Image (cartoon, coloured by chain):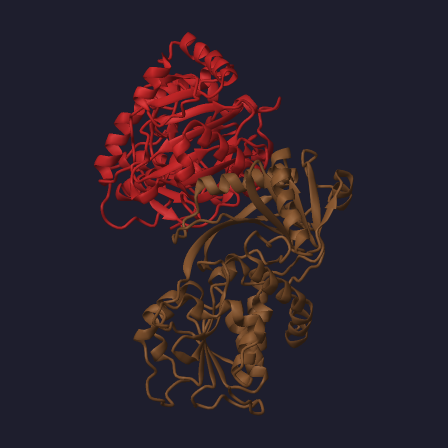
Chain colours: A red, B brown
């Protein structure tokens, strides 16, 4: 679509950018980084980079534990992207010297009661049926791996390839890498895509994508707690723990810093209020699975909005009727794990010969187009004539 | 002790004050107000007025519900002070035009389970034995008064004379009243009492009293939640609710603003960390008693330090060996309810003929004096020669 030029190291020329990215979350910065490294002139528009869903996200890279019934194509993309994470993390650390909290101890999936375990086992059987690496563990094996688990926990399984990263370290690292490669931040909001002047516009604006494009991206509220192990030490467990506890689904993500992220509610709401009942349910489930959590400090209670779509899968590719607008949005609960594959595929669309990767086929924006082939409000914007006034 | 002079309305003279109050919490400002109104020159020393225990306190005025076994003399003082609250609140509102959130709907004491109710009834019988107004209610009467109570709540009783005030409104109002009467804030910490120059020094520094005087005042940590009723409305209940829920003691204090204060832990610790287990226990007990709490926003989790004493009663009167130092401290859980009587009695000590009110007898500092009659570190400070450098 576009060909690169040698990267410049001097001041950014006051010219129309090759690529304008709308949204400075992990997806936006990763696309910007990949494009800038290829020598494209890139700007990123965001009044508050990294303040969206990624600020709240736990950072689980969990294609196995997140393989749910009826989402096979999404599971394929999650698996593909998780497979790219080790290289992506190494490359990013190499480019920035930043520790992004990438950890590979794996994930323990557990059930507290017999009912919880029965529900979990149904899902594990489905995941194994897809060929995903789920290893059931005997209770003794579970406790050998993670002695902090409550004695009541009835059973579990290991998803050894489900890793984690710290999104609050990831996004600044991606921004640093992108800026070092020449990308420039414009810290202002984009109200209409027609206000953006660039060769290609990448819309990676999370929940803001609906207003910009008319695509069916809706906010899905999630409430999350951040705890801290007492006395400045690391948490008393090493794996990501995901479990059912008396019917409540909860996860606990331990960080080297002592932080533990506990989440998350999934609510069809768009407010950011933290609700007493949600905090109670999350804490109760967390303490039921890992009793030592009761001794941890509660340092943050927070709500965020995930960009959900009708089929829970992201929207990746050209906006119908607007070949120079690429959508990279609707990642719902999967924005962090899908960052590498999204960045790679979108960059390939921009710099390649225009033929989309087969991986993209199930996620094209036009799957939500109406009969006329035009997506809602997207038909109402038009690009202005080019000028060189951006900076 | 000291005689008043006509209150001046001009600038405060650069002279030695008649009264220096160390500590700008409710006790300190109330003493300052009472003294300033009598025409005394008053300074209040506090680097951060109102930031201590009162910032965390719920503001229950509960001599009945707080009448515990083995604390008869304290109960007498609580009752005396609660009786002064209506006049005190009216006078303060008159002086400042401020709404201090004084509410008189009374307190419902409840038990969730049969065991909880049995424990509560033991205490109610004791309280009734002291002649305190405790009215047992049938479950139907309880629900008539407060329909939001959980159907599971087994029984309750009304303490109609246990009222409430909002400490975060009270302290600014007291400060305003004191300053209008001529008191002056010196927003700096006092490290040693010998640094203070005044006719009389009143030590009302909460947990700081131990270091200043050597008296046995220790921090007793309390964790408290602040919730908000949804949609900007008032809480769905009007009484203060105090209850036992599966052995957990909890209170809920509704404010007209929509705020509900839920508390509190009682811990022999001096840190200000908010602990996951404490939040879980408070929320669980609150939701068990009033299910609608689950829908409330959790807006603040906070810990504070109450100034506790060996016998749970305050320390009021002259510091042994230092007749010009008056202690008004160690109010533990009772600082708000005891504010009027403390202010009155301390002001009387300062302006009266030196003979202490009989109410003070059980609370004299010298009950903690050692055999030599001198209280610990208090013996190590001395007053400097008078100079006129304060301002």
Q: From the viewer's side, name the closer residue of B318 and B90.
A: B318
| Residue under the point 32% across and 80% down | B382
- Residue A361: in sight, yes or no? no
Q: Name the quarter where the N terminus of chain A is drawn.
A: top left
Q: From the viewer's side, name the closer residue of A85 and B30.
A: B30
In the rendered view, would you say B57 is above or below B194? above
Callout count: 0
| Residue under the point 63% across and 50% down | B126
Q: From the viewer's side, name the closer residue of A189 and B251.
A: B251
In the rendered view, would you say B325 is above or below B10? above
Tell me: A388 left or right of A330. Answer: left
Q: Residue furthest top?
A: A129
Residue B274 location (% of width, % of height) = 44, 47
Residue B333 location (% of width, % of height) = 52, 57
- Residue A222: in sight, yes or no? yes
Q: From the viewer's side, name the closer residue of A188 and A16.
A: A188
Tell me: A74 left or right of A101. Answer: right
Q: Residue furthest front?
A: B371
In the rendered view, would you say A155 is above or below A195? above
Task: Say which quarter of the image contains residue A96.
Answer: top left
Task: Say which quarter of the image contains residue B190.
Answer: bottom left
| Residue under the point 39% across and 85% down | B390
Residue A224 location (% of width, % of height) = 47, 37
Residue A284 location (% of width, % of height) = 50, 32
In the rendered view, would you say B369 is above or below B251? below
């Amino acid at each position: 679509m576009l060909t690169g030029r040698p990267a410049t190291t001097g001041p950014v020329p006051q010219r129309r950018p090759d690529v304008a990215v709308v949204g400075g979350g992990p997806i936006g910065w990763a696309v910007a980084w990949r494009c800038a490294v290829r020598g494209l002139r890139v700007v990123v528009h965001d009044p508050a980079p990294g303040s969206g869903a990624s600020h709240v996200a736990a950072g689980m890279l969990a294609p196995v534990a997140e393989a749910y019934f009826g989402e096979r194509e999404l599971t394929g993309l999650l698996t593909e992207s998780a497979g790219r994470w080790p290289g992506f993390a190494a490359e990013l650390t190499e480019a920035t010297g930043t520790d992004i909290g990438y950890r590979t101890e794996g994930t323990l999936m557990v059930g507290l009661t017999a009912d919880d375990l029965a529900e979990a086992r149904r899902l594990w059987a489905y995941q194994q049926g897809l060929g995903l690496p789920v290893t059931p563990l005997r209770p003794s094996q579970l406790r050998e791996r993670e002695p902090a688990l409550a004695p009541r926990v009835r059973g579990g399984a290991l998803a050894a390839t489900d890793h984690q990263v710290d999104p609050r370290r990831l996004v600044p690292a991606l921004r640093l890498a992108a800026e070092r490669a020449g990308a420039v931040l414009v810290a202002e909001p984009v109200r209409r895509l027609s206000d953006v002047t660039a060769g290609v516009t990448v819309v990676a604006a999370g929940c803001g994508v609906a207003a910009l494009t008319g695509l069916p991206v809706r906010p899905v509220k999630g409430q999350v707690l951040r705890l801290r192990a007492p006395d400045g030490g690391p948490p008393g467990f090493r794996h990501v723990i995901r479990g059912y506890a008396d019917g409540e689904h909860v996860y606990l993500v331990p960080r080297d810093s002592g932080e533990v992220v506990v989440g998350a509610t999934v609510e069809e709401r768009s407010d950011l209020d933290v609700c007493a009942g949600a905090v109670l349910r999350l804490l109760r489930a967390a303490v039921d699975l890992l009793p030592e959590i009761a001794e941890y400090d509660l340092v943050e209670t927070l709500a965020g909005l995930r960009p959900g779509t009708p089929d829970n899968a992201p929207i990746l590719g050209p906006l119908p009727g607007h070949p120079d607008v690429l959508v990279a949005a609707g990642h719902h609960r999967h924005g962090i794990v899908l960052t590498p594959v999204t960045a790679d595929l979108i960059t390939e669309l921009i710099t390649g010969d225009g033929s989309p990767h087969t991986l993209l086929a199930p996620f094209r924006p036009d799957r939500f187009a109406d009969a006329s082939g035009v997506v809602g409000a997207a038909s109402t914007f038009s690009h202005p004539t080019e000028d060189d006034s951006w900076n």
